[in-house]
Image (cartoon, rainbow, N blue to C red):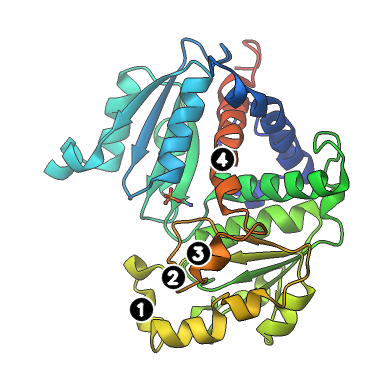
Amino acid sequence: MDTIRGGNLIDLGTLSRDAIVEVLDTAESFVEVASRTVKKVPALSGRVVASLFYEESTRTRLSFETAAKRLSADVLSLAVASSSVKKGESLRDTIATIEALGIDAVVLRHRSSGAAEQVSRYVPHVRVINAGDGLHQHPTQGLLDAFTVRRALAGRRGVEALGTGASLFEGLRVVIVGDIRHSRVARSDIDAYVTLGARVSVAGPATLLPDDLDDWPVEVATDLDAALEQSDVVSLLRLQTERGTGAFVPSLREFTSTFGLTEERAARLRPEAVVMHPGPINRGVELDSAVADLPSSLIAQQVANGVPIRMAVLYLTIAGRTKEER
Ligand code: CP
């Protein structure tokens, strides 16, 4: 797809370079809204966004809801744990119920890979935005991570990120470390970085690498320390104990000693390298607590950048089609 205008956002792997750059550029135009006294623009006034999270979330849920409100949309936020889902109502009937209330878009997080795609078939006239589905995709995380890297690189070079397109990613070396197997973030980050022109390698215990890794557009870093020394972006992934990751490593201590970004390892990074993590972080496991708070850590910027990226995604998907095109 060359644009998400008027469409859904389910899988970042289906987006072209132009489509990703369009989202990054649109997000760039929304950044300044956060610095206004009244943090609102009327772009989605009168539109309704449903927020439907079947899995836990802090960052994604809050930033989507903040984004929708900054665009002046009304937000229907379903507390799944106290909803009729607990009485056994199916995903299909829950979506049909919400659609009957009159919504323009649904933001869905679900434990099942493919749930967002399925919902898009149930409600073809509602825009569906995947906020994380099982092991499959977390497209807005991939977009906000690329946005964060582009802003950091532009800042260092003293240029405006807007207008750089994908040029800052050419030749960029990214290493993603940790639980690649269970990570929808890794899948979406790889889609974003590779489409924009970066070279991506992955590192982790063999048990936490996916079985089909040969088909991924990445290299495997067998020597983590060498990969760290050569990388511009070091992205760490959370060990997802809720998906049984504990059974894939002998112990957390062994994982940290081999694959954690300890202070000792962080000292070997290139001076201009940045450290990222989608959160929530397990301090002392994927990275030492002090490393999370280094100036080279972009973790707080990743969270902040979630809002303009999600504003861009909501704006483009909901308002991106003219009346004639609908
Ligand atoms: N990164 C991320 O998806 O965080 P949450 O689970 O808190 O939304």
Work out whether residue 88 can be spotted.
Answer: no
Q: State which quadrant residue 247 falls in.
A: bottom left
Mark 3 to mark 1: distance in Å? 14 Å
Pick whichever of labels 4 and 3 is earlier in the sequence.
3
| Picture coordinates of residue 15, whole percent (x, y) | 69, 45
Pick whichever of labels 3 and 2 is earlier in the sequence.
3
**Which residue is label 1 attached to?**
246
**Which residue shows up at 32% across the image and 30% down it?**
77
Q: Nearer the viewer, residue 152 or 12?
A: 152
The numbered mark at residue 302 is none
The amino acid pointed to by label 1 is: Gly
Q: Secondary structure at mark 3?
A: loop
**Which residue shows up at 49% across the image and 81% down it?**
256
**Disc 1 and disc 2 in contact, CB within 8 angstroms:** yes
| Picture coordinates of residue 10, whole percent (x, y) | 54, 44
**Which residue is label 4 attached to?**
304
**Which residue is label 3 attached to?**
183
**Which residue is label 2 attached to?**
239
**Which residue shows up at 86% across the image and 40% down it?**
164
Pick whichever of labels 2 and 4 is earlier in the sequence.
2
Q: Secondary structure at mark 2?
A: loop
Work out whether residue 185 can be spotted.
Answer: yes
Q: Nearer the viewer, residue 291 or 282?
A: 291
Q: Residues within 10 Å of mark 2 (few under 14, many from 20)?
A: many
Mark 1 to mark 2: distance in Å? 8 Å
| Picture coordinates of residue 191, whole percent (x, y) | 67, 56
Classify residue 247 as left or right of residue 126: left
Q: Nearer the viewer, mark 3 or mark 2?
A: 2
Q: Nearer the viewer, residue 191 or 152?
A: 152
| Picture coordinates of residue 94, whole percent (x, y) | 27, 34
